[in-house]
Amino acid sequence: MFPLFLSACATDQASSIHSAVDRAPSFWCAPKMAAGKGRIWIYRTAPKRMGLPPDIVVDNRLYEALRPGTAYTIDVAPGKHEVKLAYDKDKLDIEVVEGSDTFIRFDLDPAPFGRGFFPILVVREIAKIEIHEHTGTDFTCTKD
């Protein structure tokens, strides 16, 4: 929780959408995007007990561990950004466009001694379905 608190103090804003448990319906709406920014969605579909929750790093800033059934949004300035895990060298370089969403799923290597979690760029249509299934997020509405 401490890294998320620190990230809230930073210029770029991050928020987490946790799995749908005892929440008001408006909680399920996607957060409103900050003006002049683009959005990075980071999520995982690996179930509980599958790998340690990875610590996410965007542009050398550490964010909260990515737990099962969660998705994080990070509003960033348009341009190039780097997404990776805190403990790994696998990185994903992305280009974020103002007013647009970029979706990154962290997949888990199924090999017993595989590389663990790694980032994959996902197309909008698939990502929205997966995020909705795993977190209950409703992309037809926004919340402040």
Image (cartoon, rainbow, N blue to C red):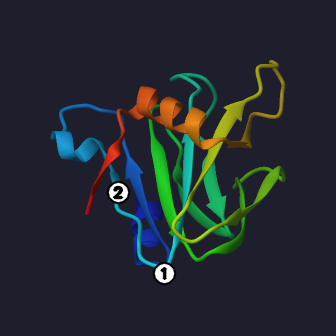
Q: Earlier in the sequence, mark 2 or mark 1?
A: 1
Query: Could you tell me which secondary element the residue under label 2 belongs to?
Result: strand
Query: Could you tell me which secondary element the residue under label 1 belongs to?
Result: loop
Residue appearing at x 83%, y 49% in the figure: 90
Q: Nearer the viewer, residue 118 or 49?
A: 118
Q: Are marks 2 and 1 in contact (CB under 8 Å)?
A: no
Quadrant containing the C terminus is: bottom left
Residue appearing at x 53%, y 44% in the figure: 66
Which percent across, then down, holds residue 21?
Answer: 25, 31
Mark number displayed over residue 69: none
Q: Which residue is mark 1?
A: 11
Q: Is residue 20 above or below residue 98?
A: above
Residue appearing at x 51%, y 23% in the figure: 48
Q: Is residue 88 above or below residue 23?
A: below
Q: Is residue 29 left or right of residue 43?
A: left
Q: Is residue 3 left or right of residue 50?
A: left
Distance between the alpha carbons at the discs numbered 2 and 1: 17 Å
Number of numbered discs on residues: 2
Which percent across, then down, holds residue 88?
Answer: 79, 50
Of the residues tagged 2 and 1, which is closer to the observer? Answer: 2
Q: Amino acid at mark 1?
A: Thr
Q: Is residue 131 left or right of residue 50?
A: left
How packed mark 1 is, by other alpha carbons closer than 10 Å (few <14, some 14-19, many 20 or more), is few
How packed mark 2 is, by other alpha carbons closer than 10 Å (few <14, some 14-19, many 20 or more), is some
Q: Nearer the viewer, residue 96 or 54?
A: 96
Which percent across, then down, holds residue 73?
Answer: 48, 56
Residue appearing at x 52%, y 30% in the figure: 130
Q: Is residue 103 above or below residue 44?
A: below
Q: Which residue is mark 2?
A: 31
